[in-house]
């Protein structure tokens, strides 16, 4: 990340490759992220969204170009990535590939070489990403859930996440991320890229190590709330073309429609003195959720061992409620004309990043 000319000594992967890192109060996580780049890239840009720790100072110390976002404009990851991309282009106009990475992740050894090779081999490929894994997978159920979520199937895909290598020409053609989105900017970008004829690929290679640091149910709930908010906004923007339309409708059906119908039926039966039918109706409702759990579990068992599959199935079912909370939050804010606000689930890392 310095400007010395001896590329061989630095171990630079490709002089046409740059990196954009985004973060806010990531502390030690950011230190690991920037240090994982080592000397593989000649130019790295760090975009800070109003950190109160020593993130900016450390990024400058390690040699990254630092962009501090204007605090009078609402922060979004999309806005941060866009401004980082523009700073990277100003610093090195010859860059044709950009690796985006979140500040709570670190690059795996060998990833950049593999990803650059994949992108160079296929001129129709706009995005390449690999396996993101969770740093402390077994320290909490919630970290485990993140790790399972990152375990996506390889091949040509419809969408990518925040960590991905992108072709600059494709990114420019679709005018980057939508900075107004508080989350879900990656599926939105992916949708527009595919509409322009570009391909996205997930390859079977380790890419980044993520540090969710999730240990409480409330953190998991807020993360699910954010996912539901994204689904509601996607439906509002794209309608039937929204790729996750079925998932959003499923969340509403199982977390709202089914409970309301069941409760109404049980109350009506009890009010008319039909105790046994009311019990049967309640049991039938429980059976519906049990069948849903078994269906999810059967699918999960094809990919993961017993405990992982059971945890995944249980929380996939439970996740429908925070998702509906997120959907309701989106529409409440929209109808009241409220400004978009970030929905965060993580605590800031320790301020001392030494």
Image (spheres, rainbow, N blue to C red):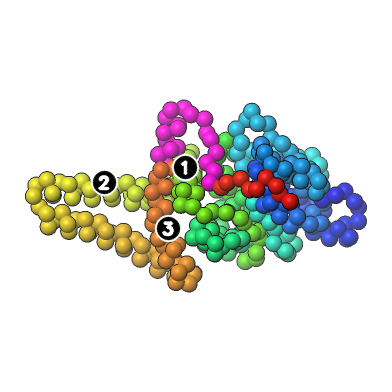
Q: Which residue is mark 1?
A: 229
Q: Give the residue displayed 68% in from the left and 31% down from the top.
A: 70
Q: CA distance from mark 3 to mark 2?
A: 21 Å
Image height of 63 relative to 236, above or below: below
Q: Give the residue displayed 52% in from the left and 55% down from the top.
A: 215
| Residue 108 in the figure: left or right of residue 320 | right
For mark 3, give the secondary structure: helix
| Residue 199 in the figure: left or right of residue 167 | left
Are circles 2 and 1 on residues that touch, CB within 8 Å? no
**Disc sitting over residue 315 in the figure:** 3
Q: Where's residue 163, x and y in %?
A: 64, 53
* Pick the front one: 83 or 314: 314
Q: Where's residue 145, x and y in %?
A: 50, 59
Mark 1 or 3 closer to N-term?
A: 1
Mark 3 or 2 closer to N-term?
A: 2
Name the image quarter holding residue 65. top right
Are circles 3 and 2 on residues that touch, CB within 8 Å? no
Mark 2 or 1 closer to N-term?
A: 1
* Pick the front one: 153 or 68: 68
3 vs 2, front mark: 3
Q: CA distance from mark 2 to mark 1?
A: 22 Å
Q: Which residue is mark 2?
A: 260
Q: Give the residue displayed 91% in from the left and 56% down from the top.
A: 6
- The magenta-colored residue range is 327-345
For mark 1, give the secondary structure: helix
Q: Where's residue 131, x and y in %?
A: 61, 62
């Amino acid at each position: 990340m310095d400007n010395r000319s001896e590329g061989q000594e630095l171990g630079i992967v490709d002089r046409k490759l740059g990196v954009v890192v985004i973060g806010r109060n990531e502390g030690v996580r950011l230190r690991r992220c920037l240090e994982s780049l080592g000397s593989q890239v000649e130019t790295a840009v760090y975009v800070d969204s109003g950190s109160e720790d020593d993130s900016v100072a450390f990024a400058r110390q390690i040699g990254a170009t630092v962009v501090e976002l204007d605090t009078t404009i609402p922060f979004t990851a999309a806005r941060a990535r866009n401004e980082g991309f523009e700073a990277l282009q100003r610093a090195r106009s010859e860059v044709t590939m950009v690796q985006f990475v979140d500040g709570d992740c670190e690059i795996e050894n060998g990833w950049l070489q593999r990803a650059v090779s994949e992108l160079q081999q296929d001129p129709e490929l706009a995005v390449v990403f690999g396996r993101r894994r969770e740093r402390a997978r077994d320290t909490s159920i919630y970290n485990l859930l993140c790790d399972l979520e990152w375990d996506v199937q390889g091949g040509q895909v419809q969408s990518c996440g925040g960590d991905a290598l992108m072709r600059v020409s494709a990114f420019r053609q679709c005018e980057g991320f939508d900075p107004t989105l508080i989350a879900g900017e990656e599926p939105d970008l992916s949708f527009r890229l595919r509409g322009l004829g570009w391909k996205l690929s997930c390859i079977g290679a380790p890419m980044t190590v993520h540090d969710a640091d999730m240990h409480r149910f409330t953190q998991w709930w807020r993360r699910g709330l954010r996912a539901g908010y994204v689904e509601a906004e996607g439906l509002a923007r794209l309608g039937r073309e929204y790729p996750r339309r079925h998932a959003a409708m499923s969340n509403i059906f199982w977390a709202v429609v089914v409970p309301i119908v069941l409760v109404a039926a049980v109350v009506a039966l009890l009010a008319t003195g039909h105790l046994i039918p009311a019990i049967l109706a309640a049991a039938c409702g429980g059976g519906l959720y049990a069948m849903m759990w078994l269906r999810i579990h059967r699918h999960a068992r094809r990919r993961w061992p017993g405990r992982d599959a059971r945890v995944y199935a249980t929380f996939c079912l439970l996740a429908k409620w925070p998702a509906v909370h997120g959907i309701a939050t989106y529409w409440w804010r929209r109808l009241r004309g409220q400004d978009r606000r970030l929905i965060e689930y993580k605590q800031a890392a320790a301020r001392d990043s030494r």
